[in-house]
Each structure stands twice: as structure tokens, then as C-alpha cells.
Image: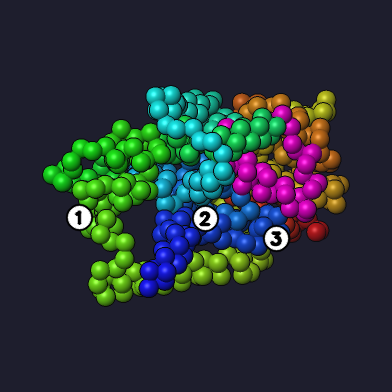
Amino acid sequence: MDKQKTMTARLRDHLPTRRRVIQLYCALLYNANLKGFIRGDIYTGPLKNLCVPGLNCYSCPGAIAACPLGALQNALASSGNRTPVYVLGILMLFGLMLGRTVCGFLCPAGLLQELLYKIPTPKVRKGVVTRALSYLKYVILFVFVVILPVGYAFRQVPLPAFCKYICPVGTLEGAIGLLSNPVNADKYGMLGLLFTRKYVILMAVAALCVFVYRAFCRFLCPLGAIYGLFSKVALLGVKVEMPKCIGCGKCTSVCKMDIRHVGDHECIHCGECIAACPAGAISLKCGKITLMDKTQAVPKSKTHSTARIIAAVAAVLALVSVLWLVNTDRAEDAPLPEAAVEETLPVGFEEGMRAPDFSVPVYGQEEAFTLSEHLGQVVVVNFWATWCGPCVVEIPYFDEVYRNYGGEIAVVAVHSDLVTDDVEAYLSGYDYAMPFALDADGSVIASFGGSAMLPQTAVIGKDGTIIYNAVGSMTRETLRQLLKKAGADV
């Protein structure tokens, strides 16, 4: 009997914890676009308009939704004098409901860090230095996520600074995730100094996570800093019943994060302190509902067990539904109905309106691209940026059009004045045929009703009238239909 108990205990110790199962589930749910890993592209369906709670790169081949941190930067970068109410509302909702429970349970980046920390090496224990470094993420939040994007927004220049210059998750999931697929081997020419710097940051953070528990989460992650601001008011999280607390300090000593007390802005609510508390004063709660305490290692009643089974079945069904939805024939791969094309036209730029004339300098050429000089041709104007994952993915579609129909169709890719050295490095290392131009002050995209939300594409007919003008990703088939609508023989 004792031997059987010992074997059972050993098996239980080697099974994934409930938190680990939830982490793995969320990682798969966030990246349910399995076809993206096979095809080497990204999902651009309707779910991409939503944000997941955790840090997961928009440009990851498997990502089915947007990263809240990237969405916030892009919203601020394009806000001008407007408040990005939608993104701020989503972050406030996640913060008020979940707080930093997102970091402990719902973030794939946290899972990756914890797996790296399991590599057997000497570990750096928390102390005064790590606690001081934990405030660095708040500096990064205000400088790279708020100040720089907002400052550049007033110049009508998009700059999601954290994503562009720092984010190791974006480098791993987005850049490496796409470039590791053989079908994207021809895109290695886009790699320049910026990617090299970000790759070094990724390797440094990964190495640090082997020795320091959740190094990125503790020292660098602005999303964790945002959720930490809601630590005192979040509905879900680890709570302490102060009448039961004996002040032994075992909860803070067992915690690997830089907390001063359970549930503060550094606490990720992982629940390790629950088992460590000798007085049973700590529990994981959602409002007044206790989800887990020291006595709930196993279900205490049939009702409790049934509720868990129902929740597990619902979670599996939700995951299967999402996998089916995004991995079957997707809407953006199907032919676009004529009515759908017309519906995407923004108010004020309806079909038949005269396209605003513009002239922009072209990289590597002395002559500028002037729209009025191309009357009699169908013209495609693509607004893009090197930091925009969806932009980079669709650039080859426009280049193919230029190569195949350059005599009949004029194509120009217009970049903002954001870090022009990156554009030149991109162009010098890649064999694109179409012209790339510079929108030096953001006036061109503004004249087309854009607000720096990228990518944006305008298709202009032979008579100079607008056929299509909208923000969003483009596919080959959609582009072909729009060109046919404009009168091009494609």
C-alpha cells in the first residue's frame, strides 16, 4: 500500500500543474493558426481585430489575434489629437478583471521564460538589485510605449517604439517565426542592423532567463507593468485573509518574483504561496468566490468535480472551434465579392472621387513619383513600414503586379519618414523591382484619409478616380479583383 502511494505521488509530481496546463492551452489558443506555420504567412481574418490578454506577437504565423501592447502603441502612434479609446478600454478591462494573473496564467512569453529557467544551472536569487531592476519596466512603459509613439504621432509619423526596438517576443515569434519557413527564404534580404540588434536582445534575454526567474517579465515587460497598476483592484487574484495571517513571511520568501507582499504590483498570482502558507490564509479568488486554497488540492464534492469537468469540456470545445475556424478555408483567401469591395471604402473617399495628387521622392532614383503623371494607367499606392509585419508580408504581391503589368499598372510603395535608414537597408538587400518612395512629412497618407494605421492601400483608376482606399491586409486574389475593377487586364 505504501509502495502504491509512493508511485502515485511520483506520478503526480511529474504531471503538469493546472497552471502549466492553462499556460499551454493559452499558447495554443493564441496561436491556433497552424496553417500559418506551414505556409509561412500570418492570419489576417476577422479575429485579428481582437486582442488577447497576454504578450503574443501580431506577426507570429500562428497568431489569431493582436497583441494588446502592439495595439496600444499603434493606436497611440496614429492617435494625433484623438484618444485611442478602444485599446485603452480593452487594457482596462483585462486589468480590472484579471490584473497580473494574465502574467502567471495566460501569457505565452511567461511560459517560455519558465521553461528556460528549468535548465539546470546556478540560479540568481532575488534581492535588492533585482527589486530595483523591476522598476525598469515602468521606465520602458512610459518611454517606449507612451512618450515616443505619442510624440511621433503629433508629427504624423508612426513609431511603435517598444515593438520596433526592443520586444524579444516579436523577434522570436514574428521575425524568426516567419523567416524560419523555407517559403520565406527570399525575405532574408530585409534583415539589417535593426534586426541584428533585436536578435542580440532576444539572445541576451533568453540567456538571462536561464539564470534569473522570468527576467523579461520582471525587468522589461511593459504589459506586466500596465497590469501591475491594477493589482489592488483586480477581480481575480491571490488574496490574503489578514485575520488568519501569522506574519511568518514564508509567502514572500517562497515567491521568485520581487514582491514585498502577496498581491502587490510584482505578484503574478501563480499561487505558489498558497501551499507555503502554514496558516492557510492565502487563496486564489475571483471576487468573493474561492477558486483555490490550501485545502483544495483535490475536489471536495461531486458538485465541485462536475463544475471542473464542465469547464474543461467547454475549454476543449472552444479550442477545437477556433482551430477549425482559422485552419479551414479562410474568408480572406476566397474571392472578394464586388459589394464587399465597395463596403471597405471609407467615408469621404467613395468610388468616383478624384484622387489627391502627390509627388514623393523615390529611393535610388532622381525623379520623384508624381500621381498626375500616370493618368491613363491604373495606379496602386501602398502605404507601409518596415516595422509592420502585415506590410512586409504583402509587399511581394504588389511587386509581382509591377513586374508583370508595369506598362499598364503603376505601383508605388510609400513609406513614412520613420527611420529611413531601415528602408534603405531593406531595399539594398532585396531584389524588388517596383519603386519605393518616402512620405517625408506624412502629408500623402493624410491626403488619402489615413492616420498611420498600416498597411493601407489605394487603387486609382485610369481617369484618376479612387476605386479602393482602405486600411487592412491585402491578398493576391483581392488585389487582382481590385485591379480588374479598375479596368486593368489581369
**Comparing labels 2 and 3, the label whose residue is closer to the camera:** 2
Residue under label 1, please give it. 288
Disc 3 residue type (three-letter): Ile
Badge 1 marks a residue whose secondary structure is loop
Q: Are marks 2 and 1 in contact (CB under 8 Å)?
A: no
Where is residue 117? Give x, y as percent: 53, 43
Q: What is the distance, in whole Å, between disc 2 and disc 3 at their CAs?
A: 17 Å
Question: Left of 167 or right of it: where is 22?
Answer: left
Q: Secondary structure of the magenta portion, mostly?
A: helix
- Please determine whether, in this image, residue 302 is positioned above or below residue 109: below
Q: How many marks?
A: 3
The N terminus, quarter of image: bottom left
Percent across and percent down for residue 72 are 47, 39
The label shown at residue 186 is none
Of pointers 2 and 3, the one earlier in the residue sequence: 2
Judge from the rendering whether residue 178 lies leftward or rightward of residue 258; answer left or right. right
Residue at image mark 2: 27
Q: Amino acid at mark 2?
A: Ala
Furthest toward the front, the residue is 2
Q: Residue at x 50, y 49 (%)?
A: 111
Left or right: residue 405 compared with residue 378:
right
Out of 247 and 22, give the one closest to the viewer: 247
Where is residue 332 drawn, in percent x and y? 63, 61
Picture disc at residue 38: 3
Q: Is residue 12 left or right of residue 418?
A: left
The residue at the point 26 percent across, 75 percent down is 302
Which segment did they paint magenta? Answer: 166-194
Q: Nearer the viewer, residue 191 or 378?
A: 191
